[in-house]
Image (cartoon, rainbow, N blue to C red):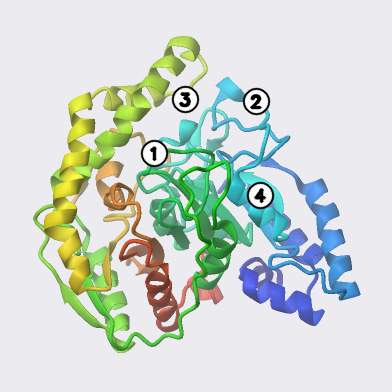
């Protein structure tokens, strides 16, 4: 197996090879480190790196496979990159800001701790924009993270480093965080899989913001399923964590009896033709698997989308004001613009976001999910976003002036955060950029979105062969 194939192994494939004695955790770790070093100057997906200590853990895992003493864990020796915003005890956590370059995390994020206890080998932290608040990934601290598919195109944000590392073959699995699309949007930009579990399924440190989620980012649906099962379950430090640990089962590719609704633009977004066509191709795969697929009219989403963003901007405003007042000389150049946007939303917008959410669910989404098992739409309406874009930079899509916020078709599912959302690749544009779709399930129905994802991957695979990978 050559280095490229090693770098694009799924965790499931790697574990099978470990058990068969055909691959060792040391060999896999060295392959992904070598790939990182090859793309460090171009893609730049990593923040802090822990290569030497990861090598020590890889040797320990290798010994366990040699001994075969029954102590092997589910992710034993699998290289994992963790988004820089998630704390790991004893490691620094900067939020991609020069303000906090010396801050050390006193404890580990509950979900990350579970992955580590399952044997995942954390060897690097992935880049993100400052304060995790941009749909691109660049900061004064970590520089610019670029898309492996095309270096002048954004890898997305805020989990752009994780998405770029996976697409480049520089890690086997990764993690992300999402409050308005920060897992799913970069997953689509880079052609990988990202999962937003129902709020409370994957615990966090006492977050009462129901828009916020932590979750897996992978190259395959199966890896995302395994990671989600490990990460999920009640935790004493998260009072909002669900009382029972859900177990998501894998799909067999058969969708007979399933009814799927879809919308290409949610009645709101300017969607390019290539994204529309690849979405329809993916939907045809669901039909081929036995599902009934129906387009539904959407004329109710625009105000909910605006207020969904406004909800989070309003909450973010105070932190930005403090950062600029106390550290305006060291923050990234785009931070004043972030504050300007945040100040554009009021307390009344925040209050109305809940009223509108109630009405949308009562009048539209609730009845729709009474008829359909899932709802499908693109993840990003146009992937051709400049690498170091700013929040208010405007460009044209289908003759309409938009920002990158306008291209992310994600925030609705943070507003309705109890719905599981699996973001998966749908194809590529004629210019070679990845496209993606979101598979949205009924509240807490995680099994359905993974069943759909598995069926699509079986019929329209991605990243499994060299011709379906970035030409690095």
Left or right: 448 in relation to 73: left
Q: Secondary structure at mark 3?
A: loop
Disc 3: which residue: 332
Is 282 rendered above or below residue 363? below
Q: Give the number of the disc on residue 209.
A: 1
**Image quarter (top left, top right, bottom left or bottom right) of the N terminus:** bottom right
Mark 4 lies on a secondary structure that is helix
What residue do we see at 41% from left, 77% from top? 451
**Disc 2 marks which residue?**
103
Which residue is nearer to you in this view: 408 or 240?
240
User: Which residue: 46% across, 14% down?
Assistant: 328
Q: Position of residue 152 (x, y in %)?
A: 43, 47
212 or 445: nearer the eye? 445
Which of pointers 2 and 4 lies earlier in the amino acid sequence? 2
Q: Residues within 10 Å of mark 4 (few under 14, many from 20)?
A: some
The residue that label 4 is drawn on is: 113
Q: Position of residue 45 (x, y in %)?
A: 58, 47
Q: Is residue 74 left or right of residue 315?
A: right
Marks 2 and 3: which is nearer the front?
Answer: 2
């Amino acid at each position: 197996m050559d280095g490229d194939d090693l770098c694009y192994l799924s965790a499931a494939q790697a574990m099978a090879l470990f058990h068969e004695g055909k691959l060792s955790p040391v060999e896999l770790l060295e392959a992904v480190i070598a790939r990182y070093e090859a793309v460090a100057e171009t893609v730049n997906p990593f923040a802090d790196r822990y290569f030497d200590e990861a090598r020590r853990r890889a040797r320990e895992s290798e010994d366990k496979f040699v001994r075969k003493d029954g102590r092997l864990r589910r992710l034993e020796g699998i290289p994992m990159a963790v988004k820089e915003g998630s704390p790991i005890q004893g490691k620094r956590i900067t939020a991609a800001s020069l303000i906090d370059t010396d801050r050390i995390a006193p404890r580990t994020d509950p979900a990350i701790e579970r992955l580590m206890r399952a044997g995942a080998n954390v060897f690097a932290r992935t880049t993100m924009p400052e304060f995790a608040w941009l749909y691109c990934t660049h900061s004064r601290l970590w520089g610019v993270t670029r898309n492996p598919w095309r270096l002048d195109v954004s890898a997305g944000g805020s989990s752009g480093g994780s998405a770029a590392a996976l697409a480049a073959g520089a890690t086997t699995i990764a993690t992300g965080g999402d409050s308005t699309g920060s897992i799913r949007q970069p997953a689509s930009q880079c052609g990988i899989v990202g999962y937003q579990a129902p709020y409370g399924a994957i615990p966090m440190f006492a977050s009462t913001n129901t828009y916020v989620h932590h979750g897996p980012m992978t190259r395959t649906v199966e890896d995302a399923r395994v990671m989600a099962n490990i990460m999920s379950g009640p935790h004493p430090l998260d009072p909002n964590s669900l009382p029972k640990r859900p177990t998501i089962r894998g799909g067999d590719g058969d969708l007979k009896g399933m009814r799927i609704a879809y919308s290409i633009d949610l009645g709101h977004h300017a969607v390019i033709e290539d994204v529309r066509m690849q979405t329809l191709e993916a939907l045809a795969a669901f039909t081929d698997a036995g599902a009934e697929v129906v387009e539904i009219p959407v004329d109710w989403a625009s105000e909910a989308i605006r207020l969904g963003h406004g909800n989070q901007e309003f909450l973010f405003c105070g932190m930005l004001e403090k950062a600029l007042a106390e550290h305006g000389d060291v923050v990234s150049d785009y931070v004043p613009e972030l504050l300007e946007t945040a100040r554009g939303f009021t307390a009344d917008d925040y209050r109305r976001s809940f009223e509108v959410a109630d009405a949308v669910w009562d009048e539209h989404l609730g009845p729709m999910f009474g008829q359909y098992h899932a709802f499908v739409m693109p993840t990003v309406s146009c992937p051709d976003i400049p690498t170091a874009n700013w929040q208010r930079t405007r460009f044209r899509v289908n003759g309409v002036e938009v920002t990158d916020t306008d291209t992310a078709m994600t925030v609705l599912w943070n507003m309705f955060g109890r719905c599981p959302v699996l973001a998966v690749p749908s194809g590529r544009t004629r210019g070679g950029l990845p496209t993606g779709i979101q598979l949205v399930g009924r509240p807490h129905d995680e099994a359905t979105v993974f069943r759909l994802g598995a069926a699509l991957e079986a019929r329209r695979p991605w990243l499994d062969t060299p011709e379906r990978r970035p030409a690095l």
